[in-house]
Image: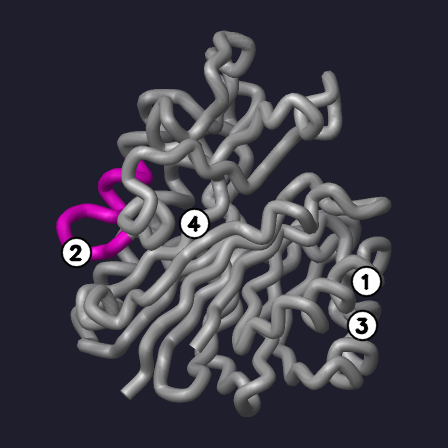
Amino acid sequence: MKIATFNINNVNKRLPNLLEWLRSSKPDVVCLQELKSTDDAFPEAAIADAGYASVWTGQKSWNGVAILSRTGEPVLTRRHLPGDLADSQARYIEAAVNGILIASIYAPNGNPQPGPKFDYKLAWLERLRNHATALRKTGAPIVLAGDFNVAPTDIDIYPTKSWDDDALVQPESRAAFRRIVGRSWTDALRHLHPDERVYTFWHYQRMRWKRNAGLRIDHLLLSPNLRGSLAAAGVDRDVRAGDGASDHAPAWVVLRMN
């Protein structure tokens, strides 16, 4: 079973890129982030024509997450991250697909920091940690996939000091990510590529794509009962080179399913 995460950075604007990648890569399940689409503008029909059923939660202009499946209808279990009833940002959706509980996650960016946006980021990640712990304790097989907006270690960002003040690399952000992973979850890409500079995001500015000046901020975390099923993990890097591409590339895992 191939499960992917892809920050599409505007699902309608980049629909041709998405459909081409679905045709070529054939993931079984896809977690999308940054839809930048209202619920009623989500391109459900075009995605269905490509063979994927979908659930989503959108938001005007920003945010928005979705889960696509070509192996049966995703069974929606949650549209919001619990822990703050006042939080209306569309950043979390959860569904069961073929016996696996899958979450599509778009964590806050947190810039500028310090400030209220950074405080919101850290509080949101702590809410995610609490919910992830509750999910894990159910014993269900779980994949937490998405744009966490954290480069966990120095190997997850190209050698530079230009990002030193950015929320994505702050010690507090990295500590929050470490607390989520803890001793239970498996960071799939890093687990299989422990010493490799694997990137999933390249900013549009300063020719960062051409210079391979990237960051790894898109992650797939596996619950303990899926660790032994992990067969492969990677990034479809070439997708970032397409015309009108998102500034992210899809990351994916392959799980051996009994």
Residue at (37%, 49%) from the top-left corner?
189
Say whether residue 238 is magenta. no
Q: Quadrant of the N terminus?
A: bottom left
**Residue denoted by label 4:** 219
Name which of mark 3 and mark 4 comes first in the sequence.
3
User: What segment carries the magenta color?
Assistant: 176-186
Q: CA distance from mark 3 to mark 4?
A: 25 Å
Task: Tell me whether the residue at label 2 lies in contact with that at label 1, contact meaning CB atoms closer than 8 angstroms.
Answer: no
Cα distance, mark 3 to mark 2?
36 Å
**Residue 49 visible in the picture:** yes
Estimate how packed mark 4 is, as few (under 14), some (14 to 19) or many (20 or more) residues with alpha carbons within 10 Å.
many
How far across and how far down the image is residue 168, in percent? 47, 28
What's the CA distance linking mark 2 and mark 1?
36 Å
Q: Nearer the viewer, mark 3 or mark 4?
A: 4
Answer yes or no: do the residues labelled 3 and 4 have beta carbons within 8 Å? Answer: no
Q: Are marks 1 and 3 in contact (CB under 8 Å)?
A: yes
Residue 79 percent across, percent down from the top left: 52, 69
Res. 114 mark: none
Under mark 4, the amino acid is His
